[in-house]
Image (cartoon, rainbow, N blue to C red):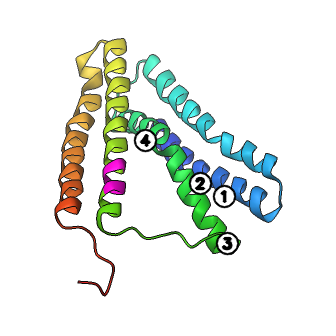
Amino acid sequence: MNLVAWAIVTCEVLFWVVILAGFTARYIFKRPTLGLIFLAMTPVLDLLLLMISGVDLARGATATTAHALAAVYISVSIVFGKSMIAWADERFRYYVTKQGAKPAKRYGMDHAKHYFQGWVKHLLSFVLAAGILYGLIIWIDDAARTEALLSILSVWSVVVGIDLIITVTYFIWPRQAKGSS
């Protein structure tokens, strides 16, 4: 694996480490300010990954799938970051500290609408990543060095389309609670 691939793995691991550290500081040690400091470190990880990937490309590296995935990672983190943290926060509170209500499971139209909101975020992250990738392609201005950046968009276009089909099926055949008909 190249440097950028390792940076993605490291940033993902560190993302969850700082999230867990933030929740632990907030709920276990009753230090909400310290918890907020940890949670505020998550965008710093995105910037770090952006810098590593950008410097690598600026030094003349040929863009790899790892460079493309760095853009995907950053866009997903920006678009889904707040909701991922809220999701993890709710579960940490309930399962670890035994506080708050049990995270609700969604069924029927509530589930379909929630999944549709997730698909819209998926589409937004795709558009943001496409902007980043096209920006890199223009910046590098060498088709031979940027081929991998375009190929990831092709694959992701198919994934967004499949996710839309799945989303539509939840409106046609709403998810049912276990035991109900």
**Helix, strand or loop status at disc 1:** helix
What amino acid type should be assigned to the residue bearing mark 4? Answer: Val
What amino acid type should be assigned to the residue bearing mark 3? Answer: Val
Residue drawn 32% across the image and 31% down it? 127
The disc label shown at residue 96, or none = 3
**Helix, strand or loop status at disc 3:** helix
Seen from the viewer's position, the closer of residues 153 and 33 is 33
Determine whether, in the image, residue 156 is placed left or right of residue 124. left
Question: Mark 2 near mark 1, Cβ–Cβ under 8 Å?
Answer: yes
* Label 1 sits on residue: 20
Q: Residues within 10 Å of mark 3 (few under 14, many from 20)?
A: few
Which tag, 2 or 4, sits closer to the chain's start? 2
Residue drawn 71% across the image and 71% down it? 97
Residue drawn 58% across the image and 66% down it? 91
Tell me the quarter of the image containing the N terminus.
top left
Determine whether, in the image, residue 55 is placed left or right of residue 72. right
Residue 62 percent across, percent down from the top left: 35, 25
**Helix, strand or loop status at disc 4:** helix
Q: Residues within 10 Å of mark 1 (few under 14, many from 20)?
A: some
* Label 4 sits on residue: 76
**Helix, strand or loop status at disc 2:** helix
Residue 181 percent across, percent down from the top left: 23, 83
Determine whether, in the image, residue 26 is placed left or right of residue 150. right
